[in-house]
Image (cartoon, rainbow, N blue to C red):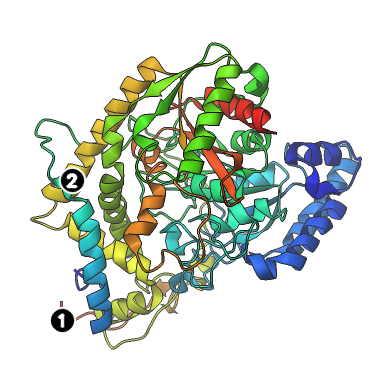
């Protein structure tokens, strides 16, 4: 059955005419039909569009044309990525029913690569929070145990890959929103270097932190998807011009001689012992494969959470000012424009979004700016310096992705601070702008997946993927 | 804060948010307490220079489609309620 093929194998078979994109698509749509009622990975399934694309790809193959590296591969998109003609909601009432007039650049690149876009996945409203319970359209459930959360905010994308609905998915990662759900759902999830992937058409949350990245069942498939979406885009002035490394070709080079550091600050208080044990096993596996493994220190990373929860809300309060009932989405009528904006935002935004907007408005307000936002930006500099010092000694760093395995639904919804603690290991690389990947590495005492995080310096995706591939091989 | 952010809160929401936001700011006290006098702030994690693109006409989004997604439109423009004379 093709849902057990990797994306690379599936595309190779379609391109060679060994099987049709149309027939393999039906297997995936069947799986969604059968199980997504329970999992709720998708806000919308675009089956007819995907079928039309699949037919066009099969025609292209029959005519001797190459439909591209992702020919016939079903892909799920986080519902904060704009899709021309298909509603994009950010799982918020304020954007319910909004149909974007253009495709995000990553969506265009997927289409050009021959991918089949099968739907838009659920998220925490505007990508804020880490459990995908905070959606206007109801929670997503973890396919490994539907009483547990899938993590978030890209929980729908992680669940789609974990449930076998799609071999690949895209998410966005502002404080860990790709890596943490990947860890909790037992799949691979990766945040590229800041600027590596165009954000044109990604609904902005915190612009100095947001990055789009891949979900996949294997490291090789994540590398394949990364190569398709990465690279400079004139439509995003913050996308970087550096050439995209051919990471797939380097995956089997191994880790002989690489220097690996285990980050002490991310292994102590708050990290569940069974999760820490898997990270130790991962470091031993790398040692056995020829890497030199030592303890590493990124001292300022302990301030990451505090700095993040000032910087991200500050940027969000500014970015989300655009949702005012004038140009798109919900409008709640009122006699004058100011009252209309207040009524629209009050009715359209959920509690977590309101919390962050108020927190950010406060952190940016006159009199508090220096104490909060300004201080947090300086802490960011310290974190960048400490990572730079660590990367003088090490090629990559290792840590848990999430402090715990998947927690029960409802466990942390009443306590925002407990929810924010989920991100303690993932936030530092958003603040530094460096790439990081979560690789499934065994299970916790509860039998649920554990993710190990590999962190690398900016533009270090090639070595990061190599280490990830070695870890993957050592566990399976 | 809610007023500045164009949000209206019910009394019970106000109580809930006040406690929750205080908890986050308490946590941020460790950052507030640091002495970071001469450390420069970082607003963007990757060094980039401004570049210019050729000044040529290129494809853009369709105006009708953009307006079609708006709540209210008149004469090819976004329509809003009265602005003049309203409270700030």
Between disc 2 and disc 1, the foreground one is: 2
Report the front residue among A429 and A453.
Answer: A453
- Say whether mark 1 and mark 2 are on the same chain: yes
Question: Extreme bottom residue here?
Answer: A335
Q: Secondary structure at mark 1?
A: loop
Q: Residue at x 34, y 44 (%)?
A: A208
> Is A65 rendered above or below residue B59?
above
Image coordinates of residue A73 in percent, x first then y, are 74, 46
Density class for disc 2 (Cα within 10 Å; few <14, some 14-19, many ≥20) is few
In three-dimensional space, the C-alpha distance between marks 2 and 1, rounded to whole angstroms, equals: 39 Å
Left/right of residue A462 with respect to residue A363 in the rendered view:
right
Density class for disc 1 (Cα within 10 Å; few <14, some 14-19, many ≥20) is few
Q: Secondary structure at mark 2?
A: helix
Quadrant hosting residue A246: top right
Q: Provide the chain ID for the residue under circle 1.
A: B
Image coordinates of residue A437 in percent, x first then y, are 52, 36
Image coordinates of residue A164 in percent, x first then y, are 72, 53
Q: Which residue is mark 1?
A: B87
Quadrant hosting residue A374: top left
> Is A147 rendered above or below residue A116?
below
Numbered badge on residue B30: 2
Quadrant hosting residue A463: top right
Left/right of residue A305 with respect to residue A476 in the rendered view:
left
Report the front residue among B8 and A163.
Answer: A163
Report the front residue among A191 and A449.
Answer: A449
Question: Extreme top residue here?
Answer: A257
Q: Provide the chain ID for the residue under circle 2.
A: B
Question: In the rendered structure, which disc, 2 or 1, sits on the residue that comes first in sequence?
Answer: 2
Q: Residue at x 42, y 58 (%)?
A: A129
Q: Is residue B39 visible?
A: yes
Left/right of residue A72 with respect to residue B23 in the rendered view:
right
Label pair 2/1, CB-CB below 8 angstroms = no
């Amino acid at each position: 059955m093709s849902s057990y093929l990797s994306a690379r194998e599936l595309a190779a078979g379609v391109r060679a005419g060994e099987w049709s994109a149309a027939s393999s698509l039906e297997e995936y749509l069947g799986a969604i039909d059968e199980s997504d009622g329970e999992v709720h990975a998708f806000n919308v399934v675009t089956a007819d569009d995907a079928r039309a694309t699949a037919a066009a790809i099969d025609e292209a193959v029959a005519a001797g044309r190459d439909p591209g590296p992702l020919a016939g591969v079903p892909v799920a998109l986080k519902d904060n990525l704009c899709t021309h003609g298909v509603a994009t909601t950010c799982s918020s009432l304020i954007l319910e029913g909004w149909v974007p007039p253009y495709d995000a650049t990553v969506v265009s690149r997927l289409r050009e690569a021959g991918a089949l876009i099968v739907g838009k996945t659920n998220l925490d409203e505007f990508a804020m929070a880490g459990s995908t319970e905070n959606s206007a359209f109801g929670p997503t459930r973890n396919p490994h145990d539907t009483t547990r959360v899938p993590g978030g905010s890209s929980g729908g994308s992680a669940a789609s890959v974990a449930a076998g609905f799609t071999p690949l998915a895209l998410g966005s990662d502002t404080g860990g929103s790709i890596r943490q759900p990947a860890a909790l759902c037992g799949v691979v999830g990766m945040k590229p270097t800041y600027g590596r992937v165009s954000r044109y058409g990604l609904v902005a949350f915190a612009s100095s932190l947001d990055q789009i990245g891949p979900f996949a069942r294997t490291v090789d498939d994540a590398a394949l998807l990364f190569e398709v979406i990465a690279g400079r885009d004139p439509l995003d002035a913050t996308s970087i011009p550096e050439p995209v490394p051919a990471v797939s070709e380097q995956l089997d080079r191994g880790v002989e001689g690489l220097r690996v550091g285990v980050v002490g600050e991310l292994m102590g208080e708050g990290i569940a012992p069974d999760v820490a044990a898997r990270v130790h096993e991962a470091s031993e596996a790398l040692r056995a494969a020829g890497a030199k493994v030592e303890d590493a220190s990124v001292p300022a990373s302990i301030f990451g959470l505090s700095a993040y929860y000032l910087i991200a809300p500050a940027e969000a309060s500014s970015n989300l000012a655009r949702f005012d009932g004038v140009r798109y989405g919900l409008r709640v009528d009122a006699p004058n424009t100011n009252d209309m904006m207040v009524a629209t935002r009050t009715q359209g935004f959920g509690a977590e979004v309101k919390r962050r907007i108020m927190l950010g408005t406060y952190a940016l307000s006159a009199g508090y700016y220096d104490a909060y936002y300004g201080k947090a930006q300086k802490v960011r500099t310290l974190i960048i310096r400490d990572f730079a010092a660590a990367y003088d000694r090490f090629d990559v760093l290792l840590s848990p992705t999430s402090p715990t395995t998947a927690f029960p639904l409802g466990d942390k919804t009443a306590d925002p601070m407990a929810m924010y603690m989920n991100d303690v290991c993932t936030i530092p690389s958003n603040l530094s702008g460096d790439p990081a990947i979560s690789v499934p590495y065994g299970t916790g005492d509860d039998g649920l997946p554990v993710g190990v995080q590999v962190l690398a310096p900016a533009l270090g995706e090639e070595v990061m993927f190599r280490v990830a591939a070695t870890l993957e091989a050592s566990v399976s | 804060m809610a007023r500045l952010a164009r949000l209206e809160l019910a009394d019970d929401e106000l109580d809930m948010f006040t406690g929750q936001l205080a908890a986050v700011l308490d946590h941020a006290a460790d950052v507030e307490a640091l002495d970071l006098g001469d450390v420069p702030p970082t607003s963007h994690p990757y060094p980039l220079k401004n570049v210019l693109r050729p000044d040529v006409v290129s494809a853009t989004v369709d105006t009708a489609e953009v307006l079609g997604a708006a709540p209210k439109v008149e004469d090819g423009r976004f329509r809003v309620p009265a602005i003049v004379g309203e409270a700030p």
